[in-house]
Image (cartoon, coloured by chain):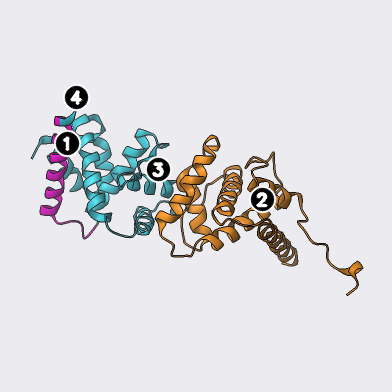
């Protein structure tokens, strides 16, 4: 294929770039009024990272350790620990109470936990970029699916 | 058994145990004993089990009470239970009044049919009384 028609590599969206910056601790785990599309990318990326780090039956103590370490690092964010734990368990496919967590708290949790998981997994720059790109692609697919329906 | 212990057992024998227990809020001694009974009952029920059993139990409890199972009430209930299983920090953000309400639901659930046998319930209350006596003795 001619290089002219090759797809452009790299992270495509502002949401993806912001996520990458949060993982590099180059941006805070909150953003002023993110769009719903941005929230969607972050949620998907968080889910991908959570499933890479844990299995569905991973011990709760291990999940708690990740939550505790992440929250300790971002104490000022004042994120409820159990809500953060439930979001991880939800991402792993467990039926847990995750209703009534506001969009702002949810997005903050996704960003913070994503950064914590990336750190625990000791991801390389390339792996992190691939993960963010994958999240962007899945978000586009999900939006396209919604439009088709 | 103390008067407070008898009050708890009476409340547990009534038609709506959780509501009856919540009416004891005027009696500081009964409230303290209720908190200890909660600790004893939860520890005897969950220590050594998979912590995920707490989540399942809370869903079952709230379904039985016809309350929402997917939101903040479920998380707070789980937090209060796990707070006496070695994770006290989970319940730090929950007000005393809210904790008391949730404890009434959980302890009241001991009477859910078929219910804990009366002798066993009395033994739990005795153990709670013993804990309270010991705590009083340790207090400065």
Looking at the picture, tell me which residue is in the foreground, B66 or A39: A39
Report if residue B16 is visible in the image: no
Query: In the orientation shown, which residue stands out farthest toward the bottom?
Result: A1
Chain identifier, orange in the render: A
Residue identified by numbered label 4:
B140
Query: Is A43 displayed left or right of B132 in the figure?
Result: right
Residues tagged 4 and 3 counted as in contact (Cβ below 8 A): no
> Please, what secondary structure does the residue beneath circle 2 have?
helix
Looking at the picture, tell me which residue is in the foreground, B5 or A21: A21
Chain of the residue that carries numbered disc 4 in the rendered image: B
Q: Is residue B37 magenta?
A: no
The range drawn in magenta is B113-137
Residue identified by numbered label 2:
A39
Looking at the picture, tell me which residue is in the foreground, A36 or B131: B131
Residue identified by numbered label 1:
B132
Q: Quadrant of the C terminus of chain A?
A: bottom right
Lower sequence index among marks 4 and 3 = 3
> Please, what secondary structure does the residue beneath circle 3 have?
helix
Residues tagged 1 and 2 counted as in contact (Cβ below 8 A): no
Label 4: few (<14), some (14–19) or many (≥20) C-alpha neighbours in 10 Å: few
Residue identified by numbered label 3:
B90
The percent position of residue A112, horizontal first and vertical second, equals: 58, 46
């Amino acid at each position: 294929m001619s290089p002219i028609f090759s797809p452009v590599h790299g992270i495509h969206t502002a949401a993806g770039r912001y996520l990458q910056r949060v993982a590099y601790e180059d941006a805070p785990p909150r953003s002023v009024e993110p769009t719903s599309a941005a929230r969607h990318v972050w949620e998907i990326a968080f889910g991908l990272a959570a499933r890479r780090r844990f299995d569905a039956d991973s011990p709760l103590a291990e999940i708690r350790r990740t939550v505790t370490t992440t929250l300790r690092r971002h104490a000022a964010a004042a994120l409820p620990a159990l809500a953060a734990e439930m979001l991880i368990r939800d991402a792993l496919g467990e039926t847990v109470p995750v209703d009534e967590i506001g969009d702002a708290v949810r997005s903050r949790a996704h960003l913070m936990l994503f950064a914590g998981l990336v750190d625990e997994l000791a991801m390389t720059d390339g792996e992190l970029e691939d993960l963010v790109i994958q999240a962007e692609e899945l978000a586009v697919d999900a939006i396209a699916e919604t439009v088709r329906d | 058994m103390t008067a407070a212990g008898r009050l708890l057992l009476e409340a547990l024998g009534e038609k709506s145990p959780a509501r009856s227990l919540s009416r004891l809020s005027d009696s500081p001694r009964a409230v303290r004993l209720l908190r200890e009974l909660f600790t004893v009952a939860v520890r005897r029920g969950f220590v050594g089990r998979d912590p995920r059993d707490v989540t399942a139990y809370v869903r079952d409890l709230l379904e039985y009470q016809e309350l929402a199972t997917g939101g903040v009430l479920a998380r707070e209930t789980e937090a209060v239970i796990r707070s006496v299983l070695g994770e006290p920090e989970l319940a730090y953000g929950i007000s005393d009044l809210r904790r008391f309400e949730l404890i009434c639901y959980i302890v009241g659930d001991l009477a859910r049919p078929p219910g804990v046998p009366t002798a066993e319930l009395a033994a739990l209350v005795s153990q709670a009384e013993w804990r309270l006596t010991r705590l009083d003795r340790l207090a400065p």
